[in-house]
Image (spheres, rainbow, N blue to C red):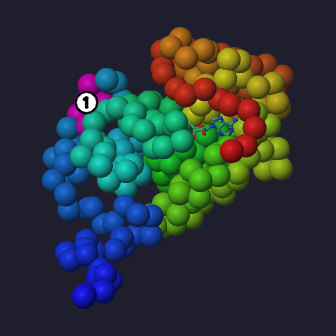
């Protein structure tokens, strides 16, 4: 009798080449230049004007941040699941927030709360000096770190932590960007904003009724602008 076969299955796909399980998918059709250009045109139509921001959306390979099964949808203007009940932000919202963040000058230090898969981080990275990025889900943070390394992004410090506390050690920040929505902005974050024009961009409110707001600090004064309705996952307490 023949022993049970221990042969590996035939026609196994080649092992992943980029260390994150995504393989090298640069060549697939739906991630082509034309597909990306359609997305850029859509963002322009919706009012995104900053050419540096549009270039980043065009150049950052969003398909590498999502599961292979979703790669063909990576350049649609929509949020997509990234596991752990979280989503990669919608390109329009990433562009809008990045635009609002760099309007009025290149920020030196940016605190990002809610790294997720690191897509927003990658879009912002060349447009600011340093990013300090906090994520409460350890597994997502590890993936984001690996992806940043893969893309040669070297100006980001990552931390497994709770954004409700901010990251005091590196403050004050020229900008704070929140990628998850609190019901009200945690008080401690105001104190971590640079007094001379530091700005905080955040979705605020309960699920289904969030406003994107920008708070600008001038000394002890905090000026608030609203930038429109958005839909984000909630800011949650504690680590995971
Ligand atoms: N912009 C990200 C998507 C962020 S989704 C991207 O492009 O992928 C929001 C993220 O905020 C989730 O990963 C969630 O785990 C994280 N988050 C929620 N509450 C948090 C908190 N208190 N501190 C840090 N991260 C938090």
Magenta highlight on residue 73: no
Q: Please name the predominant secondary structure of the magenta segment in the image.
A: helix
Picture quadrant where residue 79 is located: top left
How far across and down, in percent of the image, does residue 69 sit? 30, 49
Measured as percent of width and height from the top left, residue 15 is found at 34, 74
Up/down of 52 relative to 16, above or below:
above
Which quadrant: the N terminus?
bottom left
Q: Pick the residue in front: 127 or 178.
A: 178
Location of mark 1 (residue) = 42
Q: Can residue 179 be seen here?
A: yes
Disc 1 residue lies near ligand 1 with CB under 8 A: no
Query: Would you place residue 6 above or below residue 72 in this image?
Result: below
Looking at the image, the residue that sits furthest to the top is 209
Point out the quarter of the image occupied by ligand 1: top right
Q: Residue furthest front?
A: 1
Q: Please tell me which residue lies in front, 37 or 137.
A: 137
The residue under the point 48% across, 51% down is 122
| Badge 1 element | helix
- Residue placed at 55% from the left, 28% from the top? 233
Picture quadrant of residue 188? top right
Would residue 74 appear left or right of 207 to someone viewing this image?
Answer: left
Residue 128 coordinates in the image, percent (x, y): 57, 49
156 to 192, vertically: above or below: below
Please report the residue visible at 68 percent of the width from the left and 44 percent of the height from the top: 240
Segment tinted magenta in the rendering:
39-45
**Residue 176, how many percent across, how many down?**
66, 36
Q: Nearer the viewer, residue 57 or 181?
A: 181
The answer to whether one can see residue 103 in this image is no
Of 155 and 222, which appears nearest the observer?
155
Is 43 in the magenta?
A: yes
């Amino acid at each position: 009798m023949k022993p049970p076969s221990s042969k590996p299955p035939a026609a196994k796909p080649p092992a992943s080449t980029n260390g994150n399980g995504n393989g090298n998918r640069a060549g697939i059709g739906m991630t082509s230049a034309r597909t990306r250009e359609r997305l850029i045109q859509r963002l322009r139509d919706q009012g995104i004007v900053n050419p540096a921001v549009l270039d980043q959306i065009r150049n950052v390979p969003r398909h590498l941040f999502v599961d292979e099964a979703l790669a063909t949808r990576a350049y649609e203007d929509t949020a997509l699941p990234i596991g752990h009940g979280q989503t990669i932000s919608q390109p329009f919202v990433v562009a809008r927030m990045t635009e609002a963040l760099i309007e009025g000058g290149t920020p030196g230090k940016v605190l990002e709360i809610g790294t997720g898969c690191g897509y927003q981080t990658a879009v912002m990275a060349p447009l600011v000096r340093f990013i300090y990025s906090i994520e409460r889900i350890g597994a997502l943070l590890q993936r984001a770190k690996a992806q940043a390394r893969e893309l040669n992004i070297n100006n980001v410090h990552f931390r497994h932590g709770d954004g409700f506390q901010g990251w005091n050690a590196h403050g004050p920040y020229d900008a704070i960007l929140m990628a998850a929505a609190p019901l009200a902005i945690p008080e401690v974050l105001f104190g971590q904003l640079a007094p001379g024009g530091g700005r905080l961009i955040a979705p605020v409110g309960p699920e289904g009724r969030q406003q994107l707001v920008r708070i600008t600090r001038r000394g002890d004064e905090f000026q608030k602008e609203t930038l429109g309705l958005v839909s984000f996952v909630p800011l949650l307490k504690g680590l995971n």
